[in-house]
Image: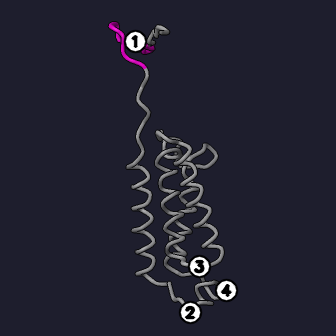
Amino acid sequence: RYRNGRVAAIAAGVAETVGGLLLILGFLTPLAAAAIIGVMLAAIATVHVRKGLWNTNGGMELPLVYAIVALALGFTGAGAFSVDRLLGLDLAGPAYGAVALVLGVFAGLYALAVRRPEPDQRRPDLDGRSKAEPTRTVNRVAA
């Protein structure tokens, strides 16, 4: 869980959307690939890995394929019909693929590192069972 799940969801959504749009356009392809790789690795680690491999069970098959395809594009570049080519950028090859991989893994690990679970509101009772933490109220006297 994330303490501020809304911010984490928005950040993941923006990274995935911008990375996907950049891949579609073929613009700054290694950075776009890194964004997709990072989001997919974080999604795999937080949601899909405990459900197994296959997508039919909600597993990690589909996000893993997305990450691998993004990595492949990081190595091969965007192709002839791309903004990168239009601007004269040659962002294909092993060095650019390695950059996409390293940045993507770093982004995914960073997303997992800043993840902090909500504090548990339950405490163990004397007999070992969990019991809801009592709420404390303050009585105020009107002056």
Q: Badge 4 is on which residue? A: 81
Among the 4 quarters of the image, the one containing residue 101: bottom left
Marks 2 and 4 sit apart, C-alpha to C-alpha, by 12 Å
Label 3 crowd (10 A; few <14 / some 14-19 / many >=20) = many
Looking at marks 4 and 3 on the same chain, the residue that comes earlier in the sequence is marked by 3
Looking at marks 3 and 2 on the same chain, the residue that comes earlier in the sequence is marked by 3
Marks 4 and 1 sit apart, C-alpha to C-alpha, by 63 Å
Query: Among all residues in the image, which is located at the extreme left?
Result: 126
Label 1 crowd (10 A; few <14 / some 14-19 / many >=20) = few
The percent position of residue 137, horizontal first and vertical second, equals 45, 12
Q: What amino acid does circle 2 point to?
A: Gly
Relative height, residue 110 to residue 57 (above, below):
below
Marks 2 and 1 sit apart, C-alpha to C-alpha, by 66 Å
Provide the residue span drawn in magenta: 122-136
Query: Among all residues in the image, which is located at the extreme front?
Result: 143
Marks 1 and 3 sit apart, C-alpha to C-alpha, by 56 Å
Q: Which mark is residue 27?
A: 3
Q: Does dot 1 land on a helix, a strand or a loop?
A: loop
Q: What amino acid does circle 3 point to?
A: Phe
Looking at marks 1 and 3 on the same chain, the residue that comes earlier in the sequence is marked by 3
Looking at marks 2 and 4 on the same chain, the residue that comes earlier in the sequence is marked by 4
Label 4 crowd (10 A; few <14 / some 14-19 / many >=20) = few
Looking at marks 4 and 1 on the same chain, the residue that comes earlier in the sequence is marked by 4
Q: Badge 1 is on which residue? A: 129
Residue lying at 63% horizontally and 90% vertically, measured from the top left: 86
Q: Which mark is residue 88?
A: 2
